[in-house]
């Protein structure tokens, strides 16, 4: 493979899922890879790609060297390959902040998704999941992406944020429009992206106002009424923009990623009837299957950092201010870290994938996502003997979210 032919910003490369052949070549031949700008590279500048497990983990665990906000004399930053404006998105969105402010906010919101809290909400979520599955199975088939995989995460996100369930389909439309690259390239905005962002912003502003006036037992009420300690620099309330961006972040983070994992996991299980049969006869295999679905789907493909100082890795000189992309989806298939990584193996142990990232920005919703995936899978195993494709699968056009828009299936051997 010619290095100059590799363009990880070309969205068509991701049209059929992770481009494993490219990542494998990079891991073997160019683990710290400098991509020159191409027509599709945003901001007209190149970026570094880290693809081996140990390098991705190393960078994620050194937020002092690799900032989620910015570095060098760059005037933008954030965790997408395209620069986002400083003090509007980079440095303001919770996941695009550095410590100590990021950590101060994280400490405030973590109890909302703690193991204790999840135990409290599990029965309610299971009820929701049962209703969703009963309705889908009663039809004998469905668009699994829309009717099942998207539904539970949307309902869970609505509960977490403390918003009326009836509004959840607006969330899906906004998340789809802002995360999709259907009618645009990286770094570009389309009319539908702008419209969705504006609608989400207005909804969030109104909701935050209500949470300030009338706090309830939800994560947004915490954010709306937050008092940060002095080390958050500055202490006191989160800014209105931080609160607003937190709302938008959870809409996207809470719904899109989990739905894509459930869908990709189901596709893998449909291709592996032996694994499905093993799960039907032994539910003790369920937690391992969930972890393998997470690794296999690697639904958040990457997060970017910006180097804060000059640093050398594998003989390559990364300069302060350079963009550095951490490809979770490549690390998760690194032959150096996983035995036979291209095999979907629900019994894989250990399975220390990086699907949720690692280090200070480790996914806040990891355990919630795991719970949702387990409930859906468990409920399906209870209800149907097998599931088969009923038409072509439609994927999202993105190198950031390995996602789906439609996944038609037929249920077979329905338990009555
Ligand atoms: C399978 C589903 C999910 C996947 C694959 C996923 C993936 C990730 C990854 C890779 C990161 C690290 C970002 C970085 O290092 O820059 C992250 C962070 C985050 N995730 Fe998730 N996520 C999932 C579900 C969720 C859910 C359900 C929520 C809702 C609560 C959520 C909320 C967040 C937040 C708020 C952060 C930022 C954490 C921080 O910066 O401290 N995620 N997620």
Image (spheres, rainbow, N blue to C red):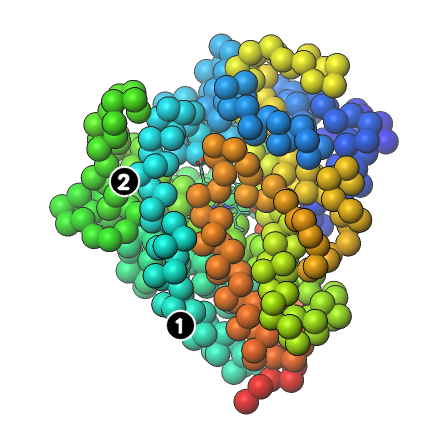
Residue 267 visible in image: yes
**Is 256 above or below relative to 58?**
below
Q: Residue beneath label 1, please? A: 127
For ligand 1, tell me if the residue under mark 2 lies within 8 Å.
no
**Residue lying at 70% horizontally and 74% vertically, measured from the top left:** 277
Q: Residue beneath label 2, please? A: 223
Q: Quadrant of residue 118?
A: bottom left
**Residue lying at 60% horizontally and 70% vertically, measured from the top left:** 283
The answer to the question of whether label 1 and label 2 lie on touching residues, with beta carbons closer than 8 A, is no
x and y percent of residue 81 in the render? 57, 29
Residue 12 visible in image: no
Of mark 1 and mark 2, the one earlier in the sequence is: 1
**Residue lying at 45% horizontally and 54% vertically, measured from the top left:** 368
On residue 39, the disc is: none
x and y percent of residue 22 in the render? 78, 37
- Count of marks placed on residues: 2
Q: Residue furthest right?
A: 1
Q: Alpha-carbon neighbours of circle 1 within 10 Å: few (<14), some, or many (≥20)?
A: few
- For label 2, the SS is helix
Q: How many angstroms separate mark 1 from mark 2 (CA)?
A: 28 Å
x and y percent of residue 140 in the render? 58, 81
x and y percent of residue 294 in the render? 61, 52
* Image quarter of the N terminus: top right
Report whether 399 appears left or right of 172. Answer: right
Q: Residue furthest bottom?
A: 416
* Image quarter of the C terminus: bottom right
**Is 205 above or below relative to 406?**
above
- For label 1, the SS is helix
Q: Residue furthest left?
A: 213
Q: Alpha-carbon neighbours of circle 2 within 10 Å: few (<14), some, or many (≥20)?
A: many
**Residue lying at 23% horizontally and 40% vertically, measured from the top left:** 224
Q: Quadrant of residue 275?
A: bottom right
């Amino acid at each position: 493979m010619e290095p100059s032919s590799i363009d990880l910003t070309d969205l068509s490369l991701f049209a059929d899922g992770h481009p494993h052949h490219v990542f494998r070549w990079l891991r073997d031949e160019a683990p710290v890879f400098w991509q020159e700008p191409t027509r599709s590279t945003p901001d007209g500048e190149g970026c570094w790609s880290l693809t081996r497990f140990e390098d991705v983990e190393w960078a994620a665990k050194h937020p002092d060297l690799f900032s989620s906000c910015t570095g060098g004399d760059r005037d933008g930053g954030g965790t997408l390959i395209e620069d986002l404006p400083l003090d509007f998105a980079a440095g303001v969105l919770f996941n695009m902040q550095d410590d100590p402010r990021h950590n101060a906010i994280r400490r405030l919101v973590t109890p909302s998704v703690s193991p204790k809290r999840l135990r409290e909400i599990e029965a309610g979520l299971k009820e929701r999941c049962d209703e969703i599955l009963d309705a889908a199975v009663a039809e004998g088939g469905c668009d699994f992406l829309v009717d099942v995989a998207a539904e539970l995460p949307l309902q869970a996100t609505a509960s977490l944020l403390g918003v009326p369930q009836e509004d959840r389909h607006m969330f899906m439309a906004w998340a789809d429009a802002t995360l999709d690259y259907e009618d645009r390239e990286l770094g570009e905005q389309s009319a539908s992206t702008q419209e969705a962002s504006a609608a989400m912003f207005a909804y969030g502003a109104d909701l935050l106002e209500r949470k300030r006036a009338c706090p309830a037992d939800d994560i947004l009420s915490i954010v709306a009424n937050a008092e940060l300690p002095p080390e958050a620099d500055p202490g006191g309330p989160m800014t209105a923009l931080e609160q607003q961006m937190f709302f938008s972040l959870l809409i996207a983070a809470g719904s899109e990623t989990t739905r894509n994992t459930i869908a990709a996991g189901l596709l893998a299980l449909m291709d592996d009837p032996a694994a499905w049969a093993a799960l039907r006869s032994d539910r003790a295999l369920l937690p391992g299957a969930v972890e393998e679905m997470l690794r296999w789907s690697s639904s958040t493909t990457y997060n970017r950092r910006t180097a804060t100082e000059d640093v050398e890795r594998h003989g390559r000189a990364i300069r302060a201010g350079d963009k550095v992309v951490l490809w979770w989806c490549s690390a998760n298939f690194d032959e150096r870290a996983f035995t036979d990584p291209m095999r979907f193996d629900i019994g894989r142990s250990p399975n220390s994938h990086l699907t949720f990232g690692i280090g200070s920005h480790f996914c806040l919703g990891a355990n919630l996502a795991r719970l949702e995936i387990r409930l859906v899978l468990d409920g399906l195993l209870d209800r149907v003997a097998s599931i088969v494709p009923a038409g072509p699968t439609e994927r999202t056009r993105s190198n950031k979210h390995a996602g789906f828009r439609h996944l038609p299936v037929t249920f077979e051997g329905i338990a009555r």
